[in-house]
Image (spheres, helix red, strand yellow):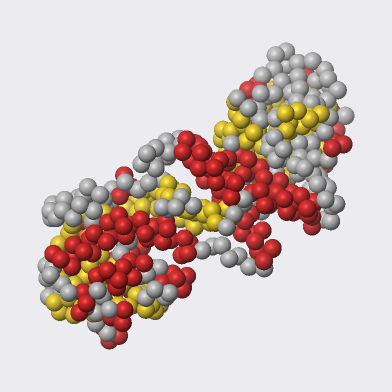
């Protein structure tokens, strides 16, 4: 009975009964004005819903031509992609950080139009035309309020809803919950459905697998076998073609993204795939062996940069400064995988025993130690008591990753371990490096790629470039996704870097464009390639 409803829900019911013309916008306004609180929905809580259900779903009030429903979302509960059956108008209010996505169906293909997180108490309008998905990707349960209606009375407003099964490319007609992995008895009718584009299908397979994991844990028949099949599909090398085709549609010839909404979505869904992959592999093998950025680094960064500009400036340095590197004792600061240092040994004549690399990363040291002599070490702990060197080398802008408040100290410490007459050689990036920085990086073999999202950040008067990185690799019939998080680099102006080296080394300091090798004037703020090298001689 309406009289037994909380006052806020009575307000909604009374308003809907008196409306002559209803629209999604008008229903949204009514729900906003009702002042519903989470406790108003507690009588219809269903957080203990069956594990096969994607969320809890209970009818609070049937008004003949409209329904008021309460839905309960445990962490990990996510609906399938669906519409709302006969519904002509309605609204949904969330009482937690619900993840919400909308979709567009066009020419037999379903695309993710938007994906984001709604704010608690936010209200969105709903209609039959809306194809969407909602879920709880947080770590706490919450309610949502749903109001669905029509302009005439019907026995079930949300009946005949479409659920889009992107595993089988079928549309399921249902009268109840829009759940993943619905049993055949809950489906009224099957129709040929749209295919999902790459990110849409990837995410739906991930969510299906997560639901099947819960069902397997509960011992539900058939869930274990289906889970294995779905997980195999998610990370199959057959994803290569659709993935690369999708990326080609949203990037230009310079590998910069051309569609910010689509770029955001593909990154979002890949991060979810990475989360699932990590957990899946841990469950299968008892450990997570695939956070291997060090292993992938060479094909994505090391080799392209060595071939693209580092080999050139190393040869330039040897010839222009008339150095016989075969006679130099070389310390590489932040040696990483040792690829460039191996080039210096192989191509420039530096004796293996006269080159040492230091790095703070155990993973990088493990890989680099297969090529060169390495030890764990930090630029900010360099001490001449531990030895001095003819050449201190730093490749791939290592100094930008240091604490920006200690950059000058790092340069001074570097000068302290260089013998008089010796040199520092290293590459840096300009403050406007973001204008060159691509969103997409491919390895030469096209089997490994990196998606990058650079932004400029101001903090206490300093400028940083922060890049969020996702790496994907196709190898041995599998697709592996590694979310590498966010990496921040300090971007000091060129004149400050030059000044720090002049003060620390007390001798000649030259700056060159790292690609063109043209000298950079003291008055310059940038250079053509947005990469530059510093050559400093110790007085």
Which residue: 18% across, 72% down?
Answer: 423
Q: In the image, residue 335 lies at what x, y percent? A: 35, 70
Q: In the image, residue 280 lies at what x, y percent? A: 66, 58
Q: Is residue 18 visible?
A: no
Which residue: 30% across, 85% down?
Answer: 386
Q: Can you say which quadrant of the picture contains the N terminus?
A: top right
Q: Which residue is most to the bottom?
A: 385
Q: Can you say which quadrant of the picture contains the C terminus?
A: bottom left
Q: In the image, residue 161 lies at what x, y percent? A: 76, 28
- For the residue pair 205 and 405, the one nearer the viewer reads as 205
Rendered view: 188 above or below 321:
above
Res 95 → quadrant = top right
Rendered view: 247 above or below 356:
above
- For the residue pair 177 and 221, the one nearer the viewer reads as 221
- For the residue pair 147 and 502, the one nearer the viewer reads as 502
Rendered view: 493 above or below 106:
below
251 vs 215, left or right, is left
339 vs 347, left or right, is right
Which residue: 70% across, 14% down?
Answer: 21
Which residue: 17% across, 74% down?
Answer: 324
Q: Is residue 156 visible?
A: yes
Question: How many numbered markers are drawn?
Answer: 0
Q: In the image, residue 263 lies at what x, y percent? A: 48, 40
């Amino acid at each position: 009975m309406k009289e037994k409803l909380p006052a806020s829900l009575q307000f909604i019911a009374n308003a809907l009964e008196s409306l002559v013309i209803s629209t999604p916008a008008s229903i949204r306004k009514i729900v906003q004005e009702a002042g519903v609180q989470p406790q108003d929905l507690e009588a219809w809580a269903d957080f203990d819903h069956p594990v096969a259900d994607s969320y809890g779903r209970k009818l609070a009030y049937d008004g003949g031509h409209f329904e008021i429903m309460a839905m309960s979302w445990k962490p990990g509960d996510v609906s399938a992609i669906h519409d709302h059956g006969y519904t002509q108008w309605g609204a949904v209010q969330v009482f937690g950080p619900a993840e919400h996505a909308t979709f567009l169906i066009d020419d037999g293909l379903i695309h993710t139009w938007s994906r984001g997180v709604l704010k608690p108490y936010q209200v969105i309008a709903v209609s039959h035309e809306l194809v969407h998905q909602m879920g709880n990707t947080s770590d706490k349960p919450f309610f949502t309020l749903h109001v669905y209606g029509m302009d005439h009375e019907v026995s079930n407003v949300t009946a005949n809803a479409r659920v889009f099964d992107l595993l089988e490319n079928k549309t399921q007609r249902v009268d109840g919950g829009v759940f993943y992995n619905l049993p055949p008895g809950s489906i009224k009718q099957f129709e040929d459905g749209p295919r999902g584009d790459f990110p849409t299908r990837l995410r739906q397979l991930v969510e299906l697998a997560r639901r099947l994991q819960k069902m397997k844990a509960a011992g539900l028949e058939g869930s274990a076998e289906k889970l294995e099949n779905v997980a195999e599909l998610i990370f199959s090398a057959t994803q290569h073609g659709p993935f690369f085709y999708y990326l080609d549609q949203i990037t230009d010839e310079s590998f910069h993204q051309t569609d910010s909404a689509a770029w955001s979505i593909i990154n979002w869904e890949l991060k979810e795939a990475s989360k699932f992959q990590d957990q899946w592999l841990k469950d299968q093998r008892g450990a997570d062996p695939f956070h291997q950025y060090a292993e992938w680094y060479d094909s994505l960064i090391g080799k392209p940069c060595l071939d693209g500009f580092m080999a050139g400036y190393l040869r330039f340095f040897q010839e222009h400064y008339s150095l016989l590197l075969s006679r130099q004792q070389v310390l590489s600061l932040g040696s990483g995988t040792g690829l460039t240092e191996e080039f210096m040994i192989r191509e420039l004549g530096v004796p293996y025993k006269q080159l040492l690399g230091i790095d703070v990363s155990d993973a990088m040291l493990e890989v680099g130690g297969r090529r060169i002599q390495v030890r764990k070490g930090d630029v900010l702990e360099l001490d001449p008591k531990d030895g001095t060197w003819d050449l201190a080398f730093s490749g791939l802008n290592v100094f930008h990753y240091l604490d920006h408040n200690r950059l000058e100290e790092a340069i001074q410490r570097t000068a302290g371990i260089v013998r008089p007459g010796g040199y520092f050689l290293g590459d840096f990036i300009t403050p406007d490096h973001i204008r060159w920085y691509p969103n997409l990086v491919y390895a030469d073999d096209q089997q490994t790629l990196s998606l990058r999202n650079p932004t400029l950040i101001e903090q206490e008067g300093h400028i940083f470039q922060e890049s969020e990185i996702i790496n994907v690799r196709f190898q041995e019939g599998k697709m592996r996704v590694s979310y590498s998080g966010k990496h921040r680099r300090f971007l000091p102006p060129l004149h400050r870097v030059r000044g720090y080296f002049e003060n620390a080394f007390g001798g000649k300091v030259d700056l060159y464009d790292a690609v063109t090798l043209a000298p950079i004037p003291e008055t310059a703020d940038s250079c053509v390639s947005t990469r530059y090298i510093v050559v400093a001689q110790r007085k």
